[in-house]
Each structure stands twice: as structure tokens, then as C-alpha cells.
Image (spheres, helix red, strand yellow):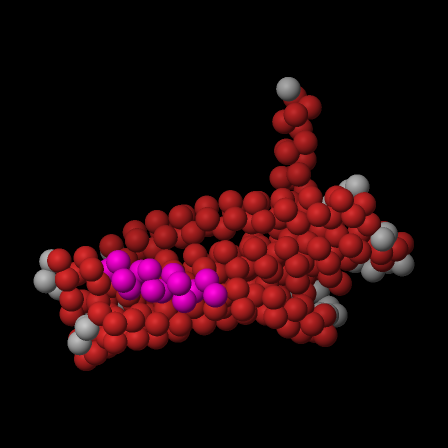
């Protein structure tokens, strides 16, 4: 029983140790700017298409359901307010969770996992190169930047798609839709949404890097680590979403 608990406890401890080392290494020179750009492009490349494919159906679903409800209570003119509130506070962050964890974190894990089983990481340590500063920091920062950009993209797609679907397919007044965008949402909600995306990007990058650097068992171990990365990242990111949403609601209430 104790042995069974010791394994996940060591994993959690190792993850927090790597997270602290990453935070420290982020402020040490030299910063690997070239690696940062390469990883930003790589994560953006694998995440852009899934973002478009996921955000559009989500937008249609939210707008369609919301407009039906508002019509039933005679408040169809508030469609813009509901769409903006749902898109900025929940739709954007949730889609970011799905894409960053499902595409970005797994790509990071697969890359570092392949290097680990080829003993490249051990070779770097022998040569006196810190893999945290050289490999982990650029990937975590790249994941964070891409998450912020993806969140903004999802919000833009959500509002645009909500407008098109509501106005042209469900007969909502276009002027009322535009005027309602700022009824329930403002700068505070937008900042909270970006904070969520920032935390998502950091956590997804850390999870992907940790599982990639701790791979064991050859190529099969890399595949298992990639699968575990998706699960662990989803759990962490949805917990972050719940906590930050609760904090945001309390702040907004004041």
C-alpha cells in the first residue's frame, strides 16, 4: 500500500521540483531565443487547425441554444450579451484547454521523450548543459504564448460566428446584438480569460516537459507518456479553470 502511494507521490514531487527549477531558469542568461521561436511555431502549427475545427462548432452550439432560450423569455435582443459572456469567460478558455493539452502538450512530450530515450538529455548533462534552461524554459514560454494567442483567436471566432449565426440564421437584430456585447462583459472578464489562458499554457508546457523528460521503456514508453500527458493536462487545466472562474466570480461580485 505504501509502495503504491510512493510512486505517484514521487511523481508529484518531481513535477513541482521541475516547475521550481523552470521558474528559476527562466530568469537566467542566456535565453534560448531561437529555440523559443522554433517551439512557438511548432506548437502553433499543430494547434491552429484543431482550434478552428473545435471553436466553430462550439460557437454554433452556444449561440443556437442561447437564442432559443432567450426567444422563449422574450429577450432575443440580449443574444449578443449572452454570446459575449459565454465566449469570453468559458468558451475561449475551454477550447484553449482542449487544444493546448491535446495538441501542444503532446507534441512537447513526444519531442522530449524521443530525446530522452536516445539519451540526448543525459549527454547534455554530461556536457554541463542544463536541459531545464536549454529545452524546458523555451517550450513552457512558447506554450504560454500560443495559449494566449489561441484564446484571443477563439474569442474572435466565437463573437464573429455568434453574430453570423444569430443574425442571418435566427433572425436576431444586428444592432441589438452588437449593442449587447458589452452588457455583461468588459475589460475585467477579458483579462480574466487571458489569465486563464496564461495559466493553461504554463501548466500544459510543464506537464508535457515533465513526462517527456521522465520517459522510461523505449518507444513504447514514449507512446504511454504522450497518452498520460493528455490525461494529466486535462485534469490540471480543468481544475485551474474551475478555481479561476470561482475567483473571478467573487471579484466581479465585489
Q: Is residue 240 magenta?
A: no
Q: Nearer the viewer, residue 97 or 191?
A: 97
Which picture quadrant has residue 185?
bottom left
Determine if residue 186 is in view.
Answer: no
Determine if residue 42 is in view.
Answer: yes
- Residue drawn at the location 43% of the way across and 57% of the way down: 94
77 horizontally vs 142: left or right: left
Q: Nearer the viewer, residue 250 or 11?
A: 11
248 horizontally vs 110: left or right: left
- Residue drawn at the location 85% of the way across and 56% of the way down: 120
Q: Which residues are magenta?
A: 53-66
Q: Main secondary structure of the magenta part?
A: helix
Which picture quadrant has residue 164?
bottom left
240 horizontally vs 15: left or right: left
Q: Nearer the viewer, residue 37 or 96?
A: 96
Residue located farthest toward the bottom when viewing the structure as drawn: 175
Q: Is residue 14 above or below residue 169?
A: above
Q: Position of residue 129 (x, y in %)?
A: 83, 60
Q: Position of residue 114 (x, y in %)?
A: 78, 54
- Residue drawn at the location 61% of the way across and 66% of the way down: 46
Please identify the quadrant where the N terminus is shown. top right
Please identify the quadrant where the C terminus is shown. bottom left
186 horizontally vs 230: left or right: left
Q: Position of residue 253 (x, y in %)?
A: 24, 54
Amino acid at each position: 500500500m505504501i509502495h503504491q502511494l510512493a510512486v505517484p507521490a514521487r511523481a508529484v514531487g518531481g513535477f513541482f521540483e521541475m516547475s521550481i527549477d523552470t521558474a528559476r531558469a527562466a530568469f537566467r542568461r542566456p535565453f534560448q531565443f531561437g529555440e523559443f521561436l522554433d517551439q512557438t511555431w511548432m506548437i502553433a502549427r499543430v494547434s491552429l487547425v484543431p482550434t478552428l475545427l473545435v471553436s466553430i462548432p462550439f460557437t454554433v452550439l452556444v449561440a443556437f441554444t442561447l437564442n432559443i432560450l432567450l426567444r422563449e423569455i422574450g429577450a432575443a435582443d440580449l443574444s449578443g450579451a449572452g454570446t459575449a459572456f459565454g465566449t469570453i469567460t468559458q468558451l475561449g478558455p475551454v477550447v484553449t484547454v482542449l487544444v493546448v493539452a491535446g495538441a501542444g502538450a503532446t507534441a512537447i512530450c513526444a519531442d522530449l521523450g524521443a530525446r530522452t530515450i536516445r539519451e540526448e538529455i543525459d549527454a547534455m548533462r554530461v556536457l554541463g548543459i542544463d536541459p531545464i534552461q536549454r529545452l524546458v524554459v523555451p517550450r513552457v514560454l512558447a506554450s504560454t504564448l500560443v495559449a494566449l494567442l489561441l484564446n484571443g483567436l477563439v474569442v474572435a471566432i466565437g463573437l464573429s460566428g455568434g453574430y453570423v449565426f444569430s443574425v442571418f440564421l435566427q433572425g436576431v437584430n444586428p444592432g441589438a446584438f452588437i449593442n449587447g456585447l458589452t452588457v455583461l462583459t468588459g475589460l475585467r472578464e477579458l483579462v480574466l480569460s487571458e489569465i486563464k489562458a496564461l495559466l493553461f499554457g504554463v501548466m500544459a508546457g510543464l506537464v508535457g516537459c515533465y513526462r517527456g523528460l521522465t520517459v522510461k521503456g523505449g518507444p513504447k514508453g514514449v507512446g504511454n507518456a504522450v497518452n498520460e500527458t493528455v490525461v494529466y493536462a486535462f485534469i490540471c487545466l480543468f481544475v485551474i479553470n474551475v478555481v479561476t472562474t470561482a475567483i473571478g466570480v467573487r471579484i466581479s461580485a465585489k
